[in-house]
Image (cartoon, rainbow, N blue to C red):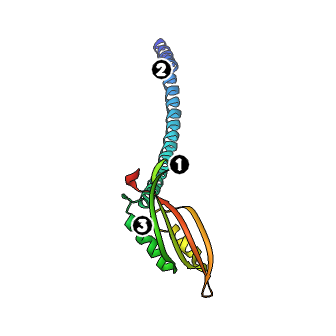
Amino acid sequence: MKHLKILTVITGILVFGFWIKPQWAKNTNLKETVKTLETQRITLRDEIKAINAQAKSSDKTVKESLSQIPLKRDQEVLIKDLQQISNRTGFLFKAIKFSKSTNPVVKAEQTNITFSVKGRKNQILNFLSQIETNKRFLGLKNLSINYVTEKGQPLAEMNIALYTFSQEDA
């Protein structure tokens, strides 16, 4: 009986030393690995959220940009827009000319618009501001202003060169 107790104790020590202790260490390592992977998962989740937010913002910017660039050239719409701007700011719309060229910066076809207006000198900034805030993108290429006085009234004669894009040219 005494030998059986000793044998049982020795077997218990051997089982503990060769099987339980290595399994315990392995379990501890696995717990540390799980903690590390959980931290990485949270970090990656946050990065994915940031990327998705950036993509949504980028999509919004692209949609806003495309809304300013119509599908077709629509020169008649451009003429109406410029005529309305002239009327709202008290300028007389005189002449307009269209041409096409390639924009060297974006390497895309563009429509060039050259026109003349005449109106009150104090409305120049209002006129240019309305061109700038037009729903369609209009870039300013050139602007020349000649100040004149007619019937004691200070007036401005402006020659304006603008450019715009259309999606059909892209």
**Which residue is the site of mark 3?**
78
Q: Residues within 10 Å of mark 2 (few under 14, many from 20)?
A: few
Q: Quadrant of residue 156?
A: bottom right
Q: Relative to 115, is 167 on the left or the right?
A: left
Residue drawn at point x = 49 percent, y = 59 percent: 163
Tell me which label, 3 or 2, sits earlier in the chain. Answer: 2
Position of residue 94 relative to residue 48, above or below, is: below
Position of residue 4 relative to residue 169, above or below, is: above
Q: Amino acid at mark 3?
A: Leu
Residue drawn at point x = 62 percent, y = 73 percent: 146
| Marks 2 and 1, how far apart at CA | 75 Å
Q: Identify the element where label 2 is drawn.
A: helix
| Marks 3 and 2, how far apart at CA | 84 Å
Q: Amino acid at mark 2?
A: Trp
**Which residue is the site of mark 1?**
104
| Marks 1 and 3, how far apart at CA | 23 Å
Residue drawn at point x = 39 percent, y = 54 percent: 167
Tell me which label, 1 or 3, sits earlier in the chain. Answer: 3
Residue drawn at point x = 42 percent, y = 57 percent: 66
Q: Which mark is residue 19?
A: 2
- Decide which of 2, 35 is in the foreground and name it: 35
Q: Identify the element where label 3 is drawn.
A: helix
Q: Amino acid at mark 1?
A: Pro
- Decide which of 157, 17 is in the foreground and name it: 157
Q: Identify the element where label 1 is drawn.
A: loop
Q: Residues within 10 Å of mark 1 (few under 14, many from 20)?
A: few
Query: Residue 94, how many percent across, how many down?
Result: 48, 74
Q: Relative to 120, is 165 on the left or the right?
A: left
Tell me which label, 2 or 1, sits earlier in the chain. Answer: 2
Pointer 2 with pointer 1, Cβ within 8 A = no
